[in-house]
Amino acid sequence: MKKTCILYPIILLCLTSCNFNTGIHKTPRKGNAVYYWKTVLSPDKDEEDFLRKNQVKTMYVRFFDVDINKNSTFSDMCAPVATIDLYNLDPILDQQIEVVPVVFITPKAIKDYPSFTDNLAHRIYAMCHKHRIDIREVQFDCDWTTSTRDAYFQFLVDVREALKQYFDTNIAISSTIRLHQLAQDPPAVDYGVLMCYNTGDFKNYDTKNSILEIKDVKPYLKYLNTYRLPLTLALPTYSWIVMFNENKKFVTLNEYDYLENLHDTTRYKHLKDNRYEVVDPYEINVAKYARYEEVSAETILEVKKLITRHYGETPVVLYHLDTKNLSKYQDDEIKAFYK
């Protein structure tokens, strides 16, 4: 173990100097792409039409999350949670859309990664084998920081080898890259997906829009020109409602369906802009204020323009495939996101 710790910085330096990290402006993949972040994969007709109309070539599908298993006797062990039900893959496979499994790993779990690396690779293989999905790539999503960076980077090296053993071929590895991570060395992966969403603190009552604000993106633009990893760009098309108590402390996040309730004046009073006050006596004990957040097409396009100006042209991934959220945008706006 001590030898591994001593050699690790040298190994990591060599890995981050390899070819997959030297092509600063190489396009990592071509074609339009979209995330699928639900627990059941069963696109409705509108979503199928969206894929076809926008010539989507790649779908990043969240297969499962990895977190500390608190429901087991072995409470310090990691386990998969929120595994997707691959109910209906036909609309995707019929359109010859490439499926890229995505695994979200919590920062707590990544510190214990040796306990789940092999099981994780086997689980991905088993899910693909069961549903007859041929894959060329797996993506990992982890909000690593300086305290978890080394563990996550080493995990990416180890899991590449584990996947190769199960699939009997080289599987490409990609990783999400959050804006704050641009200031650090990139992980040893084939390319990254730059997440231009969740840019603000949603738990802060004074935040205007935690999904995406231009002012939150600008401080990180200076890192793009010299970032040593090919990037695609992920843009948000989702919305949500953030709930706070009477002391303006965060309570919970609610999905898009909750928006219909905000227009009920017997339950909510509109204050200003995207702020509401809870007046429903049945809910007021839980939450007192609500903030509705969505991102305008104008903001999305302005952010895309800024990224392109500092990095260059890059493919776009929309987050995520959901009829109710995507319906907020016109067809020409969607095409402009992808263009």
Image: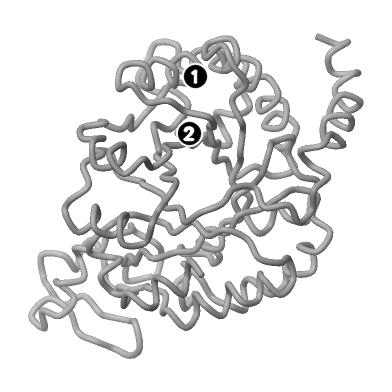
Please tell me which residue is depicted at 49% across the width and 19% down the height of the picture.
120
How many residues crowd mark 1 within 10 Å: few (<14), some (14–19), many (20+)? many
Seen at 75% across and 32% down, the residue is: 150
Q: Which of the two residues, 123 or 286, is positioned nearer the viewer here? A: 123
Q: For this view, does 3 lie left or right of residue 37?
A: right
Q: Using the image, determine if residue 186 lies above or below residue 182.
A: above
Label pair 1/2, CB-CB below 8 angstroms:
yes
Q: Which residue is mark 2?
A: 103
Under circle 1, the secondary element is helix
Tell me the SS state at disc 2. Answer: strand
Amino acid type, residue under disc 2 in the picture: Val
What is the CA distance from the residue labelled 1 to the residue labelled 2?
9 Å
**Residue 23 percent across, percent down from the top left:** 80, 48
Q: Which residue is mark 1?
A: 120
Give the x, y percent position of residue 178: 62, 54
The amino acid sitting under disc 1 is: Leu
